[in-house]
Amino acid sequence: MANVNPNLRLRGLFLWWRKWGKKDWAIAAVGFSIIVFILTYLSRPLPLDPAATTSTTDNLVGLTLLHNARDRGALCLDGSLPGYHFRKGFGSGSNSWILHIEGGGWCNTIASCLQRKSTALGSSSYMDHQVPFSGILSHQSSQNPDFFNWNKVKIRYCDGASFAGHSQYEFKNGTKLLFRGHLIWEALMDELLSIGLSNAKQALLSGCSAGGLATLIHCDDFRELLPKDATVKCLADAGFFLDEKDVLGNNTMGSFYQDVTQLQGVVKSLRKNCITRMDPYKCLFPQEIIKETRTPIFLVNPAYDFWQIQHILVPDASDPQGYWKRCRMNLHYCNPSQMEILQGFRSSMLKALSDFQQKKEGGLFINSCFSHCQTWMAETWHSSTSPRINDKTIAESVGDWYFNRNMVKQIDCPYPCNPTCYNMDFS
C-alpha cells in the first residue's frame, strides 16, 4: 500500500464493518463489507479538514427499533426488529426530510443469507446503537449547505435484497430465514409518516450502493406517500450497477441478480411492464428501473466504480492467473490493454445513461474516480478538498438540481484526468 496517513475519523466511522469481512460471503457482501473499511486508505490521503471533523459525540445519532414491526411480520433476516436513526430538523428545514438507505450488498443463496443474519446486515442485534451522521446527513452548514437543517433518517439495511424481498418465498426447511424486505419498507414508511414525514414540504430519498438500488426501486412509491404539493426527488449514490459481462465473457452479475431475484421473490417489487418484456432479473438493473420511474432522479456514480470493477468486470473467478490482481486494486498499476478495457467499461456506463441524459428533470454526477459511495462522508460530499467536476462538489451539484437552480449533467473526462479524485488503493 502507498505510504499514506489514514484519516482517523474515517477509521472510527467504518471500524464496525470489519466484522463482516468473511471470505465465504456472497460476492456482493464480501466486496462492500471489506472495501468500506478500507476507505481509510486512499491513494490521495483524506485531509483532516476542520469542517469535516467536528465533535464525534455531537454527530452520533441513536438507533430506533420498529417495535410495531413484529405484529406486521416486518423483520430482519434473523427475525429481529428493523431500525433507523433519526435527527429532527430545525428552523426552515423543519418540514423537509432526507432519508438515506445504507448499503451492504445482497445475499443470493441460503448459505450466504445464513451468514449474513449473524451480522448488522441481517440482524439489529448486531447494529451499533449510535452512528455518526456526516456528509448528506450532516447538520452542519459547512458540510451540507443545502440540507443541513432538514429532518434526517438513516435507514438500516437488514433484509439482503434492497428492501424488495417477499415472505412467500421463504424456505420452510428449518433455516429460519425471513425475506421481509418489502414489509420492512412499508413499516418504516408508516412510522416515519407518523412522526412528521406526512407533512413534508420537501423530501429527498437517497441511498448508497445496495441502498441506492433500493432508492430506485422505491422512488415512485415514496413519491406517492407524500403530499401532492411536496417537492419529492430521489438520489442514488453508487447504485447504478451495470448489466455487463466480465473479462471472460461470463454474465457474473446477471447470474447473481437472478439468484437474488429467485431466492427472495424480488420480482414482485419490480416494474410489471419490464418483467413482461424480459427476464425478470434484468429488471433489477437500474438502467431498466429508471426508464419507467416518474419521480426526478439524481445519479451519483464514479465511472470507475471499484466495487463494479472488482465484482462485475473482473471478479476473482474470472482472473484465475492473477493478471488483473494489481490493476483491480489500484488503477495506477493498470497496463495499456487493461486501461483500454476499463475505458470501455466507462463507455458502457455512459451508453446505459444516454437516454437518461436527455431527461430534463434528471441529474448526473459521473466522476472519473476509483471510488464507490461518495455522499455520506464530508470528505467526498462537500469539503475544501472534495472531488469536483467543473469546480462543483457533489453537494453543490445535488443542491443545484434539487432546487432547480441549474440543470446538472456533470460527466467527467476519462481517468486519470481529475486531480480532485480520492482514488482507492487496495494494493
Image (tube, helix red, strand yellow):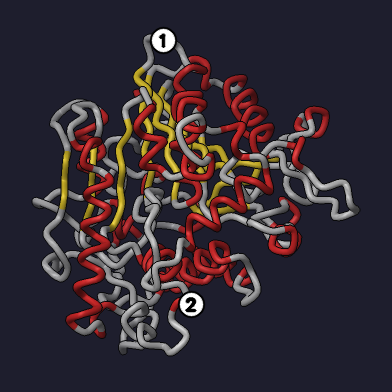
Residue at (45, 76) in percent of width and height: 318
- Res. 91 visible in picture: no
Apparent side of residue 64 relative to residue 137 in the rendered image (left or right): right
Q: Is residue 230 above or below residue 4?
A: above
Amino acid type, mark 1: Lys
Residue at (68, 32) in percent of width and height: 183
Q: In terms of image quadrants, where is residue 361?
A: top left
Mark 1 Cα-neighbour bin, 10 Å: few <14, some 14–19, many ≥20? few
User: Where does the image place residue 411, in percent across and percent down from the top left?
Assistant: 16, 50
Seen from the viewer's position, the closer of residues 391 and 331 is 331
Quadrant of the rendering where the N terminus is positioned? bottom left
Amino acid type, mark 2: Asp
User: Where does the image place residue 187, in percent across and percent down from the top left?
Assistant: 67, 29
Q: Which residue lies furthest to the right in this view?
A: 174
Q: Answer yes or no: do the residues labelled 1 and 2 have beta carbons within 8 Å?
A: no
Q: In terms of image quadrants, where is residue 204?
A: top left
Apparent side of residue 309 relative to residue 185 in the rendered image (left or right): left
Mark 2 Cα-neighbour bin, 10 Å: few <14, some 14–19, many ≥20? some
Q: In terms of image quadrants, where is residue 306?
A: bottom left
Seen from the viewer's position, the closer of residues 129 and 81 is 81
Q: Is residue 316 above or below residue 258?
A: below
Which of the marked residues, 1 or 2, is nearer the chain's N terminus?
Answer: 1
Seen from the viewer's position, the closer of residues 185 and 109 is 109
Q: Is mark 2 on a helix, strand or loop?
A: helix
Residue at (77, 29) in percent of width and height: 68
Q: Is mark 1 on a helix, strand or loop?
A: loop
Badge 1 is on which residue?
228
Badge 2 is on which residue?
316
The CA distance from mark 1 to mark 2 is: 48 Å
Residue at (55, 66) in percent of width and height: 27
Quadrant of the rendering where the C terminus is positioned? bottom left
